[in-house]
């Protein structure tokens, strides 16, 4: 067999949100906000634990409305620089060998004209999911994040 074979892949995404950096950063560490925006289309989310500190753990799940499909996962916060950077591990809770293995997610936040640039590097994605499906999921989640953080000031007296 020629060529390199690997059981994992990586993905890098960059998005600009029309919102202050602190607001976008906080959406990644507030359990209620995270449960609202991270689940991709077709799923609801539930956060069971979120200890937003270095060495702290998080655990959550995505579930379809009909409850026929559910995915639990969690990890450990490795680095937290307020309003600048979040690094955490990610691990699916499954017995499926093709889904085992620790992933690493690095999120950076930077002020840019008109908002906040967020760069996400997701390493160690199981090959069975692949970069294409991971990108679809992340794009759906980031669409949800924009809907949450990019709010207009409501007028009125």
Image: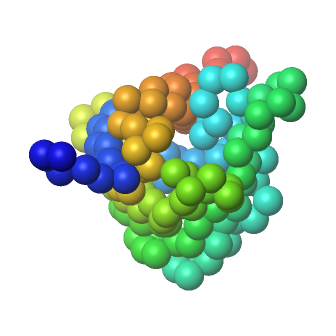
For residue 33, above or below residue 149: below
Residue 141: percent from left, percent from top: 54, 33
Q: Residue furthest bottom?
A: 55
Residue 36: percent from left, percent from top: 70, 37
Residue 25: percent from left, percent from top: 49, 53
Residue displayed at 49% across by 46% down: 24
Residue 63: percent from left, percent from top: 77, 36
Q: Is 110 on the left or on the right of 122, as rendered?
A: left
Q: Quadrant of the C terminus?
A: top right
Of 155 and 28, which appears nearest the observer? 28
Of 40 and 18, which appears nearest the observer? 40
For residue 100, above or below residue 139: below
Q: Is 140 on the left or on the right of 56, as rendered?
A: left
Q: Residue furthest top?
A: 156
Q: Residue furthest left?
A: 2
Of 55 and 21, which appears nearest the observer? 55
- Residue 86 visible at all: no
Of 63 and 24, which appears nearest the observer? 63
Residue displayed at 52% across by 26% down: 140
Residue displayed at 13% across by 46% down: 3
């Amino acid at each position: 067999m020629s060529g390199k074979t690997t059981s994992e892949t990586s993905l890098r995404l960059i998005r600009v949100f029309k919102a202050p950096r602190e607001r976008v950063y906080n959406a990644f560490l507030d359990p209620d906000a995270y449960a609202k925006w991270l689940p991709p289309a077709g799923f609801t989310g539930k956060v069971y634990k979120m200890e937003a500190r270095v060495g702290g753990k998080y655990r959550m799940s995505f579930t379809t409305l009909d409850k026929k499909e559910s995915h639990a996962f969690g990890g450990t916060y490795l680095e937290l620089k307020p309003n600048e950077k979040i690094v955490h591990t990610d691990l699916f809770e499954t017995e499926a060998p093709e889904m085992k293995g620790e992933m690493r997610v690095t999120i950076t936040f930077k002020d840019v004209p008109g908002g906040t640039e967020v760069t996400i590097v997701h390493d160690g994605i199981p090959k069975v999911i692949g970069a294409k499906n991971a990108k679809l999921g992340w794009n759906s989640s980031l669409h949800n994040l924009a809907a949450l953080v990019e709010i207009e000031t409501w007028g009125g007296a």
